[in-house]
Amino acid sequence: MTLVQLEYVLAVAEYKNFTLAADKSFVTQPTLSMQIQKLEKELGIEIFDRSSHPIKLTTIGEKVVEQAKIILKESNKMAQLVFEEKGQIEGDFRIGVIPTVLPTLVPMFYKTFQRAHPKSNLIIRELQTEEIIAGLREGILDFGIVVTPLHEDQIVEKTLYYEPLVAYVPDSHIYHSKKMIQTSDLDVEDLLLLKEGHCFRNNVLNLCEAAKLKKQPVKLDSGSLDTLVKLANEGYGMTLLPSLHAEDLPKESQKNIRHFEDPAPSRQVSLVYHQSNLRRSFEENFSKTIQSVLRGKIYFDQYDNVTSPLISLPK
């Protein structure tokens, strides 16, 4: 039994397809299949039910996968201990980033960090907050960048910055003539929101008194901030955006940005990791890099008006 075989098993379990799992593992499909077959022969069991589509785990296969996660997580700690003792930042770092942060933040820090730490390999995946938390607990991810607070046991949160929210108000909207927006102006019936599952949706709803309604009368929602901007331009309402995303909009759209009166609502963006994670040198240097590229654009100290990514609506 080898660690590589266990990694291939987890890949197939995740993607439910041998070809896709091989592609994600950067090996050929015959190589991956052969290694899994060797493991199955050694154990005298079948881990996967290959007759089903998509591929499913057998009953014993489910137990093997759970144990494989534990073994790989513990084996990774050995390398972490050595690198940390030497003060080295090298090897793979698997980082999950939420969709409303990744497009704007990652391009800003990626090259800077890689140049400073050429032996490091940042493996970045776009994931929802719940997926990141699960990945940290299972050892699939080393770190995450999410909106906090999360209040999750064993998950450490290190605040990176506070990002103000701004309103996108098209010229057809009644508020377009306003120079500044107040939170009291927000009406959930007039707001274009991200789909359920996006924490930024909850950030916005927490600003609206209408969030207390039993039903949210939202006309349109989307999985993309850019789509929300397009829908707003088509006359379907207004929307809110993180300030870094608003800065990336085309010039013709910048005229529709309206800032909130102080204290403007903001979201708290943090680096998160499991308390068992040993790569503290990476955490410190990674955080410093992100804050250095954002200096002058964003807040780093405690902010007065932080809207929560968690929401509890009446049923």
Image (cartoon, rainbow, N blue to C red):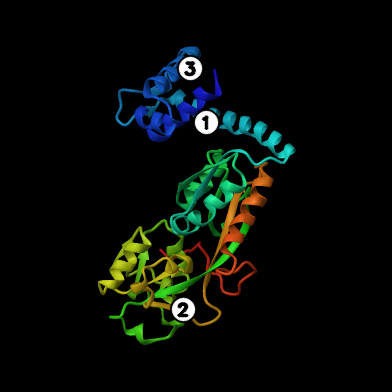
Looking at the image, is 133 positioned above or below residue 294?
Answer: above
Residue 226, image x and y in percent?
Answer: 35, 63
First-in-chain label (3 vs 1): 3
Indicate the amino acid at tag 3. Leu
The C terminus - image quarter: bottom left
Where is residue 175, by image quadrant?
bottom left
Label 2 crowd bin: few (<14), some (14–19), many (20+), radius 10 Å: many
Circle 3: element type: helix
Residue 137 in sight from this viewpoint: yes
The N terminus - image quarter: top right
Where is residue 229, by image quadrant?
bottom left
Which residue of the protein is positioned furthest toward the front in this rendering?
115
The residue where tag 2 is placed is: 259
Residue 7, image x and y in percent?
Answer: 50, 28
Looking at the image, is 289 positioned above or below residue 21?
Answer: below
Taking depth in this image into account, of 304 and 167 the one nearest to the observer is: 167
Residue 149 in sight from this viewpoint: no
Distance of label 1 from label 2 (alpha carbons): 48 Å
Q: Residue at x 44, y 59 (%)?
A: 100
Residue 24 shown left or right of residue 4 in the figure:
left
Q: Which mark is residue 66?
A: 1
CB within 8 Å, label 1 to label 2: no
